Image (tube, helix red, strand yellow):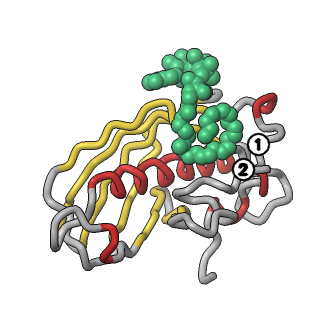
Amino acid sequence: MDFLAVQDFYPEDFAWCYGCGRMNSSGHHFRTRWNEEETLTEYQPGPEHMAIPGFVYGGLIASLFDCHSTGSASLAFYRQAGHALGDETPVPRCVTASLKVDYLKPTPLGPTLRVIGRIAEIGRKKVVVVSELWAKDVLCARCEAVLVTAPASMLQNSSPS
Ligand SMILES: CCCCC/C=C\C/C=C\C/C=C\C/C=C\CCCC(=O)SCCNC(=O)CCNC(=O)[C@H](O)C(C)(C)COP(=O)(O)OP(=O)(O)OC[C@H]1O[C@@H](n2cnc3c(N)ncnc32)[C@H](O)[C@@H]1OP(=O)(O)O
């Protein structure tokens, strides 16, 4: 891999997400990283991700925002605590409380999609991430997501059996 992504460091038991879990061989394997003060997830949709010929399915776009946002929230909490990816301290895992997607323009199927996130708010256990999805120079969709840290007590016995 040419860069470190937050999903590379999720504890193994919590790395099964269909969107971004590295342990899920059937999933998308979305990967999210810092790009200075913004977060970035890039993804190349395939022909199977079609809505109508030439355009990306909106559900895939929502999935991309979902995992990009949870990843961004984890990155934000980790940086706020003074850590960088690669530290031994476990990366916190977040779940999605709210995901609002505005589809602004049809998203062309072909270019690599770029999702760029901004940490709009960070609290003790809640982060608000505002993101844009770009296809080349076209702003196709926008998302506001609320992410909440998964309570430690819930992070047990969650591997698939
Ligand atoms: C997939 C697991 C789902 C179950 C989660 C349980 C355990 C997690 C275990 C492991 C996690 C590991 C991996 C996760 C894998 C994939 C993640 C990818 C993304 C997803 O696919 S994930 C699935 C969809 N996701 C859910 O299945 C969540 C179901 N849900 C809940 O489990 C609770 O609902 C929760 C935890 C969200 C909140 O519960 P809570 O008791 O901690 O929350 P609390 O009331 O303390 O709120 C704290 C602050 O969040 C604000 N807030 C809360 N809800 C809001 C809303 N809807 N809109 C706007 N703001 C909201 C409050 O206003 C307050 O804000 P403030 O601090 O400013 O007052």
Q: Give x and y (percent) for residue 153.
A: 81, 28
Q: Is residue 130 above or below residue 116?
A: above
Query: Which picture quadrant has residue 107?
Result: bottom left
Q: Quadrant of ligand 1?
A: top right
What residue occupies the far front of the structure in this picture?
161
Around disc 1, counting alpha carbons within 10 Å, would you say few (fewer than 14), some (14 to 19), or many (20 or more)? Answer: few
What residue sits 83% from the left and 52% below the top? 89
**Tag 1 residue:** 158
Q: Secondary structure at mark 1?
A: loop
- The residue positioned 66% from the left and 65% from the top of the image is 22
Identify which residue is drawn at 27% across, 48% down.
142
> Looking at the image, how many numbered discs can be counted on the residues?
2
Q: Which residue is mark 2?
A: 14
Mark 1 CB in 8 Å range of ligand 1?
A: yes
Say left or right for 45 vs 66: left
Query: Can the viewer see residue 145?
Result: yes
Q: Toward the viewer: 118 or 131?
A: 131
Relative side of 48 to 22, left or right: left
Q: Nearer the viewer, mark 2 or mark 1?
A: 1
Q: Disc 2, ligand 1: is the CB inside 8 Å?
A: yes
Return the x and y of residue 40 as percentages of the image width and height: 45, 63
For the residue pair 39 and 24, the one nearer the viewer reads as 24
